[in-house]
Amino acid sequence: MRENAAVPCRCHVTRRDLLRWSALVAAAPLVACSDQDEPVARATAAATTAGVDPRTVSPVNLELVTLTETSAVITWYTGIPGTDDGTKRMLPKPADGQISYGTSPSRLTMTAHDKGGLTPYHYVELTGLEPGQTYYYRAASAGKPATPTPLPLVNGNAAGTAAPASADSPFTFTTPQPPPGRHLFSIALCNDLHLGETVAGLVGGTSITGISQAPGLPRYPEIMLEGLVAEATARGADHLLAAGDISSEAAPTDVTRARTLLDRFGTYRQDYFVARGNHDRAHAGAAYAGCGTGEWQGDDCFRDDFFGGSAPTYFSHDLHGLHVVGLDTYDKAGNGGDAGGMSAAQQSWLAADLKAHRDQPTIVFGHHPLVVEGTPFGGGASSMLDATQATQLLATYASTPGVFLHHAGHTHRNHRTVSPAAPGVVLQEVSAAKEYPGGFSLLRVHAGGYALNFYKSRTDLAREWSERSRQELAGLWPQFSLGASVSDRNSVTARDLSGLKPA
């Protein structure tokens, strides 16, 4: 969500925000690089088995990323203590990865391993779990326990649903019950692809610099989009919704490249759909001169590629009986650095569309959130849809029983909100696809409800860039983007969706 070419940054930055961020950077550790001592015999045995000297390995950044009723995805990183790759992160160190787990803290009798052998970028999936069951686990590399990503600024716990009782206790989580009824279909929800971007996490006006790709590797937005498409397909997504900032600055080559990579998922406007973000707005300049004239300013390459030139950039479409509404939340003039907004024409169309489908199960997706709750990293009016329009839309949702989910991006974080103004609608922000944690939310629709589960993209290059880009904002970025709680990225909601059809 970089605001404009002159002052690139992720979210709206005020002077107060810059001072707050600078204070946080000064007060917080840049990266966790500490080890916990393990018995010599265990470390020696692990080193012998894996061929890795435990003294050269520090397992950190443990995260419980995904939690479903029958599975859990747990990730961490192994680096070389005392080193620095130039981003205040330890140099990567390939090592084995193992999860020991069970239903009793004293009996972790089951094990799961990294499938790819030795790697610094560990991704272990536990499968065959029982719904509604509490599990305990430890993650280790070279016999040394992985320490969790610290989230003190948001009072969060990255490694489980409850903090361990002591440093020697295992981490814990409880699997949810599945949504009632049979599974009907799944939809991948993603946003902030930023095709064309070359530096992630720039904050204008401070000494905090962004993170670039390591020399010799492909551009990270393409790596992450390719990984997202592959992962969404592997996870059984029948459709995909991309909620804006498809491009970095809507250059013709970047918009076209995004379309080409998304086409790997399926057919546009049949299998996948996109909405405009503030970065996808029309631009002026020679680079855009070959595109059609924008409604508000400049030339509109995004509309040309995805909406056929003169067609509206907002729409609705039915999928298996589910009504899907795509909003253009930058349907206005501007430089991309202000609040989102919809034109009067779009607002009139939206009100009529929702009224016509008042009782039909409906999800809405668009780039700007309707509500941005307080955070130590700023936020506020410029990080959301125009406040008056957002209030009006929530009131419309309250009188439209069919609407049950609003998917937004822009903030680059995982966050679940339910507003008192529309208590029947989950407002789900999904973190950016193009950087840490780097992935998408899978909406699994059942006859009696739905589940939302966040998945990291797990190709080798995607895991490598995700771990490198976590050092944005001087290493503080995970405290905002991962989600303060497991429920910010994984949730189950009961809802009567029995009128929908299976894919």
Image: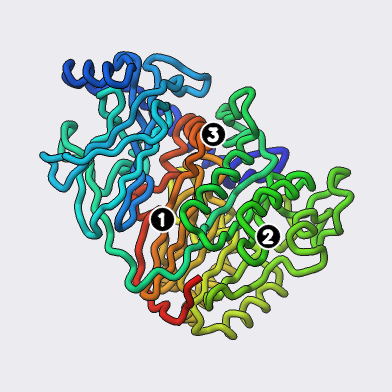
Classify 365 as above or below 485: below
Q: Give how far across and how far down residue 59 sits, in percent.
A: 33, 26
Q: Is residue 75 something that shows in the picture?
A: yes
Q: Nearer the viewer, mark 2 or mark 3?
A: 3
Look at label 2 and name its amino acid.
Answer: Tyr
Neighbourhood count class around disc 2 (C-alpha, 10 Å): few under 14, some 14–19, many 20 upward: many
Q: Choose top left, top right, bottom left or bottom right for residue 209.
A: top right
Q: Residue 461 got which mark?
A: 3
Label 2 and label 3: CA atoms lie apart by: 32 Å
Left or right: 21 as drawn, with respect to 244: left
Label 1 and label 3: CA atoms lie apart by: 22 Å
Q: Give how far across and how far down residue 228 sits, in percent.
A: 54, 47
Look at label 1 and name its amino acid.
Answer: Asn
Classify 131 as above or below 182: above
Which residue does the numbered mark 1 point to in the structure image? Answer: 453
Which residue does the numbered mark 2 point to in the structure image? Answer: 330
Of residues 408 and 270, the one drawn nearer to the viewer in this rendering? 270
Q: Choose top left, top right, bottom left or bottom right for residue 152.
A: top left
Earlier residue among tags 1 and 3: 1
Left or right: 79 as drawn, with respect to 2: left
